[in-house]
Amino acid sequence: MTALIEAASPHVMNTYGRLPIAMSHGEGVWVWDVNGKKYLDGLGGIAVNTLGHNHPRLVPALQDQIGKIIHSSNYYHVPGQEQLAKKLVELSGLTNAFFCSTGLEANEAALKMARKFGHGKGIERPEIVVYEHAFHGRSIATLSATGNTKVQAGFGPLVEGFIRVPLNDIEALERATKGNPNVVAVFFETIQGEGGIHPMRAEYLRQVRALCDERDWLLMIDEVQCGIGRTGKWFAHQWAGIRPDVMPLAKGLGSGVPIGAVVAGPKAAHIFGPGNHGTTFGGNPLAMRAGVETLRIMEEDGLVAHAGAVGEHLKQALQREIGSLPGVVEIRGQGLMLGIELDRPCGELLGRAAEAGLLLSVTADRVVRLVPPLILTQDEADQIVALLAPLVRDFLAQPR
Ligand SMILES: *Cc1c(COP(=O)(O)O)cnc(C)c1O
């Protein structure tokens, strides 16, 4: 790429290993960089750009909102908060929402709720069950809940009060919490995103729900990445027919406008009172409009079912083209949240794919992740496969 781009950010802190590419604009599932090169967006800004780029109904709505009011303050009522909360409650079967601006903030709020829930029951040192390979964010508390030592390295001492268990193993959960009166909540992603697209099994979700009911624990499900229609249900846990008590959301909720939410059911909706929690930007009129319009357009266009169907098509096509290659361990995930696990680290595929005109990511070292906009068509899904399959084939064929 051009020297101009490589040297473009000498004053920006170096917190990401960035590719020497800068995006200029987008249209649907396509983006163009500042040099005019075109890419098929299989990443969606990491599961954020639900409606793709320059959506013909979202953009005018946001322009309208910007011309009215961007930000007021949580000192006053924000009508958009009630509108979006009402919609989220309707879609989730829960009862109340709190608004913030990012995923880690939503998770941080959930962790605070769990602790206060415990204190309300006289538990002075509440403990929360979390999972291996989990990712919940990069604040001190959420990185402590995260199950990745790379995320934690250099930031100790970690926040205490977490018990870590493996996925999909109800006996392990029972063993780890046996006779412990301080447990207050179980916290996980329905499909782990950063951890490498690892789904919780429906049966396990039902078992954990039952255990939480039996023990009076909060079931807290981080749907920051897998929620908002991506798997073919509004929220991925709905495949198991269960409801959480607390559900953090963010990424796809605003189609690119920063937004986070914690949606809570009856057991958790009134844990916070005035003064317990807050954020300056959370729930501002622009973010609320983005959330309301995103969900409205998703409903009008049937994008939830669409994501499920196109995702299934994409998964089958990938399975057919590269699924049986030696070196492809597994293709997994649901809807438009798919991971292709290889038998070796494959970080370099990120750059090679971009060179070939495809945006994707590699997570957990060896898992190629596809989380494109939910407007992806079947034809565009086929184009992803046509770009990706030869890259994976060539990569696996090269000597190690
Ligand atoms: C991305 C992510 C987060 C963190 O969200 P930020 O907006 O980056 O703070 C938390 N949980 C899950 C499951 C995520 O995928």
Image: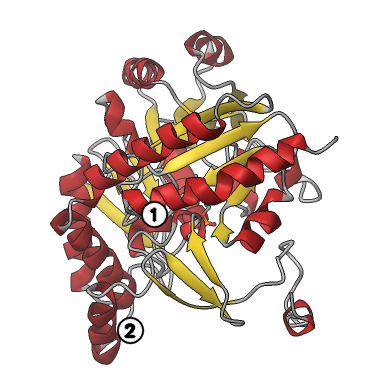
Q: Percent from the top left, x then y, of residue 195?
A: 60, 37
Vertical arrangement, residue 370 with respect to residue 189, above or below: below
- Could you tell whether 85 is left or right of 333 in the image? left
Q: Amino acid at mark 2?
A: Ile
Vertical arrangement, residue 361 with respect to residue 68, above or below: above
Q: Amino acid at mark 1?
A: Glu
Q: Nearer the viewer, residue 215 or 106?
A: 106
Q: Nearer the viewer, residue 329 or 154?
A: 329
Q: Which mark is on residue 70?
A: 2
Question: Which residue is found at the position 36% from the left and 59% from the top?
Answer: 50
Q: Percent from the top left, x then y, of residue 361?
A: 60, 51
- Residue hosting label 1: 380
Question: Which residue is found at the position 48% from the left and 43% from the top?
Answer: 111
Mark toward the start of the polypeptide (2 vs 1): 2
Question: Which residue is found at the position 15% from the left and 47% from the top?
Answer: 90
Residue 27: quadrant of the picture: bottom left
Residue lying at the far right in this picture: please name it. 400
Quadrant of the snapshot with the C terminus: top right
Q: Nearer the viewer, residue 359 or 397?
A: 397
Residue 254: quadrant of the picture: bottom left
Q: Percent from the top left, x then y, of residue 188?
A: 48, 33
